[in-house]
Image: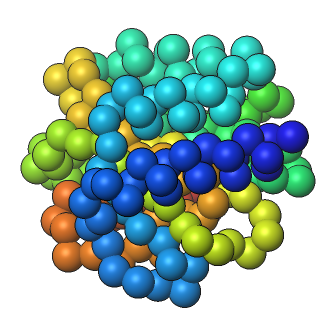
């Protein structure tokens, strides 16, 4: 059911995306980054999680943070929802959350500095990642960056992660760096 919704959402974004600027180059899945309005991106990922009280609560709680990063990942087949949340307001705390557990992790000092400097130079924007093909299993990703008590960046990809994107767009590359830092600290 959720896969069908993801495919329909992608088709809508692809048809809308053809009228917008694409900021990425070709890659093995033919993924493109399409700038979108904040409302368009938000409607897509909120529509996807509308049946999950846990996920709704986590997104609502993150909206109370003045400066931070949220990386949400859902994997088809496993039903796995996980949130990686960095809260700069509370001494750079980093949590991994799922419906069944919450785990606090420590960031490497170098990553804290790098993440902080990236957040300062990011330009405001919302992006959708569209892919023509994928490995058969959807992996939904939502990356939200908040600065100065407002959403600075939203990135939504319903098929694959940001590593597939090749671009010369500085803002998208910075978002990709944030994604890499979050992933690296998750697996450490």
Q: How many marks?
A: 0
Q: Position of residue 51 (x, y in %)?
A: 77, 20
Q: Please identify the quarter of the rendering in which residue 23 is found.
A: bottom left
Residue 78 place in picture, x, y as percent: 88, 51
Q: Is residue 135 left or right of residue 12?
A: right
Q: Say whether residue 118 is left or right of residue 57.
A: left
Q: Is residue 130 above or below residue 85?
A: below
Closer to the camera, 107 or 180?
180
Quadrant in the rendering for residue 134? bottom right
The residue at 55%/67% (across/down) is 131
- Residue 163, can we see it? no
Instruction: Identify the residue shown where x is 49% and y is 56%.
Output: 14
The foreground one among 138 and 54 is 138
Q: Measuring from the top left, give residue 21's x and y in whole percent.
A: 25, 60
Q: Residue at x 54, y 86 (%)?
A: 28
Would residue 43 be visible to someone looking at this image? yes
Quadrant of image for the N terminus: top right
Name the colouring of the figure. rainbow
Asked if 73 appears above or below 27 in the picture, the reply is: above
Q: Quadrant of the C terminus?
A: bottom right
Viewer-closest of 91 and 62: 62
Q: Residue 24's spot in the image, x, y percent?
A: 32, 72
At x 59%, y 52%, the residue is 11
């Amino acid at each position: 059911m959720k896969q069908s919704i993801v495919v329909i959402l992608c088709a809508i974004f692809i048809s809308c995306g053809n009228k917008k600027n694409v900021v990425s180059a070709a890659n093995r899945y033919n993924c493109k980054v399409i700038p979108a309005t904040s409302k368009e991106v938000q409607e897509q990922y909120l529509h996807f999680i509308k049946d999950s009280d846990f996920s709704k609560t986590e997104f609502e709680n993150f909206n109370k943070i003045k400066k931070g990063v949220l990386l949400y990942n859902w994997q088809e087949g496993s039903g796995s929802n996980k949130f990686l949340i960095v809260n700069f307001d509370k001494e750079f705390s980093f949590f991994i959350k799922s419906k069944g557990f919450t785990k606090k992790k420590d960031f490497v000092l170098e990553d804290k500095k790098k993440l902080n400097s990236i957040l300062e130079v990011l330009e405001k924007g919302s992006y959708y990642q569209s892919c023509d093909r994928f490995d058969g299993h959807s992996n939904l990703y939502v990356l939200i960056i908040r600065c100065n008590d407002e959403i600075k960046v939203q990135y939504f990809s319903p098929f694959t992660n940001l590593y597939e994107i090749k671009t010369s767009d500085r803002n998208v590359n910075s978002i990709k760096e944030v994604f890499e830092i979050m992933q690296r600290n998750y697996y450490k």
